[in-house]
Structures are given as C-alpha cells and as structure tokens.
Amino acid sequence: MGKRVAMTGNDAAAEAMRQIDPDVVAAYPITPQTELMHKFAEYVADGKVSTEFVLVESEHSAMSATVGASTAGARAMTATSSQGLALMFEILHIASGLRLPIVMPMVNRALSAPLNIHCDHSDSMSCRDTGWLQLYAENTQEVYDNILMAVRIAEHPEVLLPVMICYDGFIISHTMEAVEILDDETAKRFVGEYQPKLQLLDVERPVTVGALYLPDHYFEAKVQQARAHQTAFTVIQEIAQEFTKLCGRSYDYFESYRMEDAERAIIVLGSAAGTAKEVVDRLRSAGERVGLIKLRVFRPFPHHELAKALGRTRAVAVLDRSIAFGSIGGPVYLEVRSALLDQRERVLVLNYVYGLGGRDIFCEDIGSVYEDLRRVIEMGSTETETIYLGVRQEKLEQPVHIEV
Amino acid sequence: MSGLREYMAQEERITGGHRACTGCLPMVSLKQALMNIKDPVVVGIATGCMEVVSTIYPYTAWNVPLIHNAFENAAATVSGVEAAYNALRRKGKIAKKIKLVAFGGDGGTYDIGLQSLSGAMERGHNMLYICYNNEGYMNTGIQRSSATTMGAWTSTSPDGAVKLGKQQLQKNLTEIMIAHDLPYAAQADIGHWKDYMKKVEKAAAIDGPTFINVLSPCTLGWKFPAEDGMSIAQMAAETCIWPLYEAEHGYRKLTYKPREKKPVREWLKMQGRFRHLFRTEHEPMIEELQRQVDRRWDLLLRLCGETP
C-alpha cells in the first residue's frame, strides 16, 4: 500500500502529478508555486514522467496552451498562484466554457498592490465565478489527495469541468509534513487512462472548437455549464467514497469537527483550520460547546448540507482570507449567510477577515472569535459589519499617500 | 506547387457559405494557404473577422479541425495542441502526420498576440503561423493597429483638423520574426498568389516554427470596390511599401523585384482610407511616407544582397 514520507505541499503536488503523468504540462514560474514545477521538471528530466513539458512565456500562455492540449485530446495540467492566476483570468472562462477537464494546483497568494508573496485567498476567490470547481486543502496530505481526486472529478463524462486545487502559499506549499503517498500502481489505477470525447487531432472527424454563439445559442451553453456544476456535486462525493476505499481517508464537501451539540461554530477554509481545531479542543475540554466546519469544496458550494450542519447552532463565525470590496462580507460569508437564510431558527452569523498578505493567525485570535460568538448569543443579535482579525488598528490611521 | 486546375479540383478545407464580405481577401489568404499543405492539417485561429464569419454556431465553414481560443493566444494554443500531438504520437495514440497551422490577423499578431507568438517561435513548436494582415482591427470597426500604414484613416486615427490619420510607421513584424532565427519566415501579398503559395508550401514542409506575413486587403477597411483587392495587393509590392521576400535562418532573399519601382502614391490613390492625403495641403505627408518607404526598401535590398 502507501508509504509515509515527509514532504512539502509543493512536493506532494508534484508527486501527485508524477503519478498522474499528464500528457502535457505547461508552466510559468511564480512564487510560491515555483518549487512544484522545479520538482516536476526533475521528473521530466529524469524520465520519470512521459509528459510534454511546455515552458511558456506567461501564465496567459500557460492556460492557453493547456486549453489547446486538452482540446487536442491530452490530459493537460498547469499550476499557478496570485498574479499568474489573475493573468489567466480570461482563459479560465474559456477552459470551463469549452468544458475541458483541466486540473490546476493553485497555491494561494495575495494579489498586488501592495505587492506581497504570502498567503491569502484573494486570488482564487476573485476567480470563484470562472466556472472552475474549487477544492481547498488544510494540509499537505489533502493537497495530494485532492489532486488525485480532481482528475477523476474533472474527467467524469457528466462533469467535464476544470478544477482548481487551492492550498495556502508557504504555510502549506513550503512546510514539511508527514504525508501518506499511494503506491504508483494504486494511484495510477485510481486516476485511470484519460478517455477524451473531444479530440481536435482526429483529422478524420473534424470538429470546430470555440465557435461563435450568438444570442440564440449562448444562453443554453452557459446553463448546461451551470448544470454540470450541480452534477459535479454528486460526483465529488462518489469519487471521495471510492478514494476512501483505497486509503481510509474520508472526504466530504466539508469536515465537521466536534460539531455534535455545538452551539457556536467557526467556518474556515485552508490551513487556518488546523489552528482552529486546536482551539476547539481546548475549549471543549473546558466544557464549551464549540465546533468547526472546514470547508473543502467552495465551488460548487454545498448550501443545503451546510445549512443542515449549522442549523442547530446559535451563532456562526465565517473566517474569510480575502475581502469582497464594497460588500457586507467576504466571499465565504456571503455564501454561508445565504445558506442559513431559510433556517426556521435564526442563526447569527458574524464575518471576520483574517490573514491578508500572510498575516499569521494565532490560537488567541480564534479564541477571541468564540468569545465574540458567546457575546452575540447573549445579546441575541449581531452587527453585520466585518471584523478584521489581527489587523493593527493604529496603522489604519496612516494617510494613504504621504505628502512630501 | 500545383496549377490552377489542380487547385480547383481539391476538396475545400474552408467551404463557401461563410459570412465574409464580398471581396474579402483575408479569407482567400486562409483558403489558399490550406490548399498548399499536403498533410492533414489542424488549425488554430485567433479571434477576429475570419473566425467570426466562419464559425457561427451551429454552422462551421471548416472541413478541417479548428480551435479558436481567444484573441491574443493563437500561437500559445497551437503550442499546446502541438505538445499534445507529440505526446499522443509518442504513446502510439496518433499515427498520422499532421501539420499544425495558426492564423491570426494583424491585431492578433502584431499587437495583442506578439508575446504569445514570440514565445511559441522561440520554443520551436512545429507550426506554421500565418498572419493575414489587413492593417487594422476590422472586426471591431476598423481601428488602427501597429500594422496600419502611416497616414491611413481608421476609426481611431481619423483625418482631423490637427491630426491626419495614423501618425506612426508600421511595425516591421516580418523582421521581428526573422530575428527569432526561424528556419523560414516570409512576407507575401495575396495579389502575387503564386509567390504566396510557394512560400506556404516551403514553410509547411519544414518541421519547425515558420512564419508568413501575407498582406490581405480589406474592402471595408481600406475603402475600395470589392473587385479591386487583388490589384491593390499587387501594387503594394510594385511600390515596395510591402516587399515580397523570404528568410531562412536570417538569410534574406527577394522573391519579387519590381522592374520599375512605382511611387507609393499609386498605391495610396487606389484606397479611400488615404483620400485625405491627396488634398494639396497634405501632400507633404505622402512625400514623408515615400521617404520612409525608400529608406526601408534600401535597407532590405542591402540585407538581401541586392544593389540598391
């Protein structure tokens, strides 16, 4: 079976890619994704994969070439972060609109300006409506597992949608952790051989890909795409169950951590969930009824399941690692609040934004959130204003442009 | 190269019934190019007139596989197709030899797609990239591009009270592509169709990155009667504003040398987009353009080892 090894998140992603052995990988360097591609380049150089490795001149071309390769009938992958994802934005829509099963590790990093290479989720969250599925990982193990599962989800004939595997820059990508890796044969059998329906290179049966759809056809194509997201919802669970049979690790849309009888809960995605679990354990041992929801699947969003999981809580705090500027809360908050709107008993929902540009989040921060939740339950109501967790208040008073 | 009879007997790779304008020469450039490639082809095309008029769902004019991705990425997209072709061929999943071709207009090639094209050529993908150059963004309503001739009227370079059409000279894209040390790069016009077809045949036979820049007049954007396009294309070579030449790894060769170099005004006066330049007070602009044409022609002759 599998073996237990110490790996960084990027190494684990590269390891999954080695086992997948895609026909084509197109890549462009960007921190903190770089080490992933360094590792994969070694696999290419050592003949450990049979991949055509295309080192393009930009992320825009990385995604464009991946689209070309996938259309041609190849299993194609790329990986990126932050500015790179932003540069790909135009082609992200084309990849999903053409229904191409591209899998892309996405190492979360803040967007400029100000320039910053550290983790937050502003990059992937700004691409939430590009039609890509988005899975988030708490740790290195989940990075590896999610990538393998993503191939199956993306290529499922009823889904045919691209998938982003999001994981926190540096916090996961560069941190060494113990990971259980499937043996090559098991991994390869799970992923299987790609059986494309669309093959541009089939010259006997020519197809036109990327045609112009006028108002009489465009709408239907997009609604079909929306339906594929609904189908993906079921498929994600099926693939997870199949994966569990291989290794015992179970996956769902989200992980409910000590949620039994919880009256206060935090919802978070990514590495901060690990810190939050520690806090939950401490508070539980002090007899407090607190729990945690760690979101794994952000697109499609599990509204009904989440409403069910949170329905019996009294107050919930949503921790966003990005700002939805001008909105009443972050992207995750908006979804969770909508999900809870139809509950017969009102659940109070608070919004926190934390960790922008790699600002660390500590147990005390999360502890203060559970305290806030206790307070709003006592008060029976809540302000809808976003709370910025870990921001230095005194620095907020500085002028934007300093006069010289 | 085949004769006209053989060409006419070929099965069309782009069929009629598409929605290009009467007298559209870019479409002729595409059709003729595909006639001169013996192997099965797979085509990538940039967003633009040719893509829009030929792929209106649920119809397509393409009898060969076609991928349209976006405006600026035809070369990058075909890079990916080529990588897939190499991978699948190596794995025994594709047996046939296929030629990969990319088409882009001058907007998608000179301007927004230049980086993508440069990257693909530098990486050495086995593809023939053909720029159907009609000197402007015709699909979006005739705006200036870096391929537009100096002095030309366009929607974004109108002939106004203080500015007279486009203010800058054309970018010399063919030379930029030659600087990529390509095994083959050429400049053609659709009027000299035999010369163009020879170039396509030559380029397509090379396993490697090749490039052709084919001047393809646009009846709407250049403002001329639909039947005049071929003569206008030919006149561009006669005046040496658009010389016909090729380069193999930088060694340039003229493929057509006009017996007598005609003044550039002969070309300008055939097109409505230059009408304003012929008002007496604007004559100096024509003279200036002539000087620039002479300068570039002189340099090219030297590069081709010809006597200026």
Image (cartoon, grey):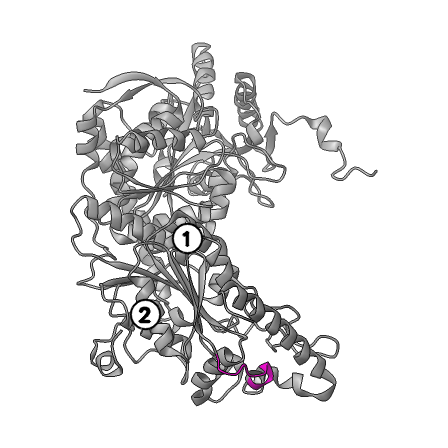
Which quadrant of the rendered structure holds the C terminus of chain A? top right
Residue at image x 50%, y 35%? Answer: A121
Tell me where residue A45 appears, x and y as whole percent. Answer: 32, 32
Tell us which disc is closer to us: 1 or 2. Answer: 1
Helix or strand or loop: what does disc 1 sit on?
helix
Residue at the front extreme of this rendering: B307
Residue at the right extreme of this rendering: A404
The reply, left or right, for residue A148 in relation to residue B302 is left
Which quadrant of the rendered structure holds the N terminus of chain A? top left
Tell me where residue A222 appears, x and y as whole percent. Answer: 36, 58
Residue at image x 54%, y 64%? Answer: B172
Splitting the image into 4 quarters, where does residue A395 fall?
A: top right
In the foreground, B85 or A176 = B85
Q: Which residues are magenta?
A: B258-266
Q: Label 1, on which residue?
A: B121
Helix or strand or loop: what does disc 2 sit on?
loop
Q: Label 2, on which residue?
A: B57
Position of residue A39 relative to residue A178, above or below, is below
Numbered disc total: 2
Q: Are marks 1 and 2 in contact (CB under 8 Å)?
A: no
Can you see residue B113?
no
In the foreground, B225 or A67 = B225
Tell me where residue B96 appears, x and y as whole percent. Answer: 17, 56
